[in-house]
Image (cartoon, grey):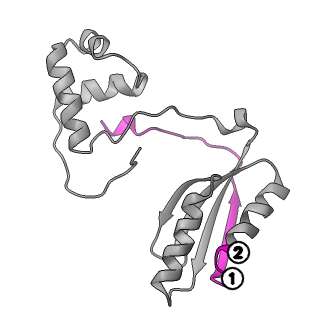
Amino acid sequence: MAGIVYGKEQKIDAKDKKILKELFLDGRMSVAEVSKRTKIQRDSVARRIKRMEKEEIITGFVPVINPPALGLPNIAITMFKIKTDSLENKKKFEEGIVANKYSVHISTVIGKYDYVVALVYRDTNHLNQIIEEMKRYIPDFIVDFELFQVVDEPKFEMMAQLL
């Protein structure tokens, strides 16, 4: 899955929105079932899905994994400020946090910090191990970091409300 792809804004119409809303309910739904539920011809549904994939409106179909079911019941939002004197080191650090299997979301940001990283973890000891590993990617590269343990998620959306 490519995730969010920045580039040209694509146009979608009411039929595309109907198709996307059905796929949000079940990404494994067959084209025939989407056609039945949306009352849009099967060939049209297939063509529209293919076009939306090509235009990167749809960037993949993936299961939503529940981390607590895998023994990772906690989430921390971590913000990192890094040294910005070397693009090579920045790239190496970024590759490290991307490769870390406990990093479930990474954004580069503008402001006091350079990265916001959502981490899933077992317990505080495990979280400390993850952070220490990140510090070792490039010694003394992290200038500062701040960590927020998530207590509750009043909203977790797959962005269906944008349609």
The answer to whether marks 1 and 2 mark residues whose Cβ atoms lie closer than 8 Å is yes
Picture quadrant where residue 55 is located: top left
* Location of the N terminus (image quadrant): top left
Secondary structure type for disc 1? loop
For residue 107, which numbered disc appears in the image? none
Q: Which residues are magenta?
A: 136-163
| Amino acid, disc 2 | Arg
**Residue 142 magenta-drawn?**
yes
- Please give the residue where the numbered disc 2 appears in the rendered image: 136
Q: Residue furthest right?
A: 125
Q: Residue at x 38, y 48 (%)?
A: 2
Q: How far across and down, in percent of the image, does residue 53 sit?
A: 26, 38
Q: Residue at x 20, y 52 (%)?
A: 9
Task: Describe residue 132's horizontal placement relative to residue 35 as left or right.
Answer: right
Note whether residue 40 is visible. no
| Amino acid, disc 1 | Pro
Q: How far across and down, in percent of the image, does residue 71 sit?
A: 76, 38
For residue 139, which numbered disc appears in the image? 1
Residue 2, compared with residue 15, is above or below; it is below
